[in-house]
Amino acid sequence: MKSAIYRMLNAVRVLLCGTIRYVTTIAVVCTIWWYDARFLNQAFDANLALLKAVANVIDGSGKVESAMRAFSAEKVLLFSEASMIVWLVGKLVLLLLGLILGRRGPEGIEKSGSGAL
């Protein structure tokens, strides 16, 4: 019974973490757009150039590039990049909080409370 409850709580935790990261990524992209839309447009253009190069390597006729443009792959790629940055910043914040609070060492080994070497 306990393992079923733990699995359910873990599923809820994973869903909640994913939702928080998704909403945070949207907030970051909107904030960047609000303050510097030119930067975001340059990122779109850079991603489009990257996707064009990849599409030309895969298929020189332009069908792959057309499909990628139809699905707005450059915007999806930018959102994925922003999501990865949000995830990395979150992991760094959690690591720093763990180090500041002194619960774990850098290798994740529990610290001893005796102070003796």
Image: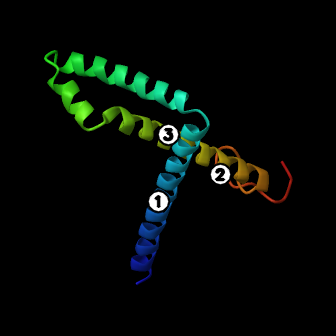
Measured along the vertical axis of the image, is residue 11 above or below residue 60? below
| Direction from residue 77 to residue 101 in the image, left or right | right
Q: Are marks 3 and 2 in contact (CB under 8 Å)?
A: no
| Direction from residue 97 to residue 3 in the image, left or right | left
Mark positioned earlier in the residue sequence (2 or 1): 1
Q: Which residue is mark 1?
A: 19
Q: What secondary structure is found at the residue carrying circle 3?
A: helix
Q: Which residue is mark 2?
A: 94
Look at discs 3 and 2 and give the one toward the viewer: 3
Q: Amino acid at mark 3?
A: Ala
Numbered label tally: 3
Measured along the vertical axis of the image, is residue 7 above or below residue 50? below
Residue 62, how many percent across, how many down? 17, 20
Q: What secondary structure is found at the residue carrying circle 2?
A: helix
Q: Are marks 2 and 1 in contact (CB under 8 Å)?
A: no
Look at discs 2 and 1 and give the one toward the viewer: 1
Q: Can you tell which quarter of the image residue 80 is in? A: top left
The one nearer the camera, 98 or 34, is 34
